[in-house]
Amino acid sequence: MSPRALLATLCLAACTTTEPTAGDTDTGATGTPEVVAGSCLYTNAFSRAEECKEYRGAAWTAETADADCQAPLAAAGPGTFTADAPCSDDGLLGTCTLAGGTDEEAVLHFPGSDPDACSGLRLGCSFAEGELALEPICDGAGGGGATGGVFKPFEQTCAQPVDGEPAGAAADGEVCTWGAISACTEEGRRYDDYASCDDVRTQRPYVPSAKQAGTPANDPRLTDDAYLAELDWVTSQVESCACICCHSTASAPGGATSDWWLEAEPLWIDTLDDDGLGMLAGWVDSTAFGAFDPADNNGFDRSTTGLPTTDVGRMLTFLEGELARRGLTRDDFTDTRPFGGPLYDQLVYTPSACAAGEGVAGDGTITWNGGAARYVYVMEPDAAAPGVPPNLDLPDGTLWRLDVAYDADPVASGLAYGSTPEGTVQAWPETGAAPALQAGTAYYLYVLRDVYQPLARCTFTFGD
């Protein structure tokens, strides 16, 4: 998977929720109507899997469907449109029906044979606000392990250095490392020696897809000692960070990694596509992925480059040199969509009014649609939407936030504002009671099935 696959739209939860979405069933894909406007075959930008979009609603014409196929949801690039032809129903994991029963109905078809991908379909279809129908191959799939389960909150662990390494920076010589996808251990050490990659993979998707570098045998970089030394340094920087949990065969499950990977021969940097390389250099925005303060991340900084580094200037020189070698400039990325998929969409989301019955009632009862939740926010109406931890999950204007423990069951709609049922904790305010809500005042309700999986995000007037 490309660097964009760090956060996928339709395959995002390869390592997240196991809860079914509204409309999730274990029945097979819905039948195909006799006439459709056409179908679009494309490659998912995140999973790198082939998918198909079928245009069923009466509003679709061959022309409008073809236009949509030039930029279908979550696609790596323009798709291939075939007029008057449905998607194939052979070998499917499931389908996701968008705008079902309306003139704009379309159905996403997900081919595949790996049950581990089923949890990703659940999340992706919920993001698309569609109705999911899973095939029998997905029965009981998507729970736990490196490719399933609940987002595990960050914890910092401290440990003595591995044999042969110098003392750590902590006062007692230990090495302290956050168990987070955006975290790094101390420079010169390997991340997975000091933190759990299994925990990290609950925080981002992981889909095996190791591709080769494709470096020409006569590439002058292969005999340039200065260049190779810099590549070794960049490699060491990557190895000190949680990137290796998905991008190193030594750390990823089964030895297969996602799109770009450090063991690719002869030059792993060539496994990156142009957008991915642009993101690592900071030429394409990846703010939505979140970042630690360097002072809390063993000196690794991700505020300029997408790849965390202890030497921003040196990293930029290398990565910008690679972009220049490909004939690329910053101007080539002016219109490139920021990285993050649904994470980016979440950050720029503008809420609308809550559906009837949703919100906080006058007696303090919180009501939302779509299923049980792990995070519940009540915020000022102009607050930004929450993103991922560590730096985007507590927006200014948050009045109250409830978190469900990693190993506890999610909470159902109908809980009381300011309460902390068993298995939950009030994450904000850190001390004291939730602030009183004022009758007739507008607020913003934001409820998530899990991190980056919104169920409700709407404004309401308290007491209405």
Image (cartoon, rainbow, N blue to C red):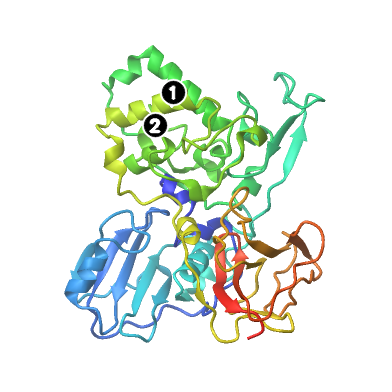
- Left or right of 136: which side holds 441? right
Count neighbours of disc 2 (C-alpha within 10 A) and say few if under 14, some if 14 to 19, many if 20 or more.
many
Between 166 and 156, the one nearer to me in the picture = 156
In the rendered image, the vertical position of residue 107 relative to residue 33, given as above or below: above
**Residue 29, percent from left and from top:** 41, 78
Q: Which mark, by number, is residue 231?
A: 1
Structural distance between the alpha carbons of marks 1 and 2: 8 Å
Q: Quadrant of residue 78?
A: bottom left
The three-letter amino acid code for the residue at tag 1 is Leu
Q: Earlier in the sequence, mark 1 or mark 2?
A: 1
Q: Position of residue 190 (x, y in %)?
A: 61, 30
Q: Quadrant of the C terminus?
A: bottom right
Direction from residue 268 to residue 26 in the image, left or right: right
**Front-lying residue, 132 or 289:** 289
Kindly identify which residue carries mark 2.
269
Q: Is residue 378 above or below residue 36?
A: above
Whether residue 215 can be seen here: no
Considering the numbered disc 1 on the image, is that residue within a helix, a strand or a loop? helix
Give the x, y percent position of residue 174: 77, 28
Labelled pair 1, 2 in contact (Cβ < 8 Å): yes
State the SS at label 2. helix
Q: Position of residue 135 (x, y in %)?
A: 47, 74
Kind of residue sitting beneath label 2: Ile
Q: Quadrant of residue 383?
A: bottom right
Task: Say whether residue 387 is visible.
Answer: yes
Residue 220 in the figure: left or right of residue 193: left
* Residue drawn 58% across the image and 32% down it: 300
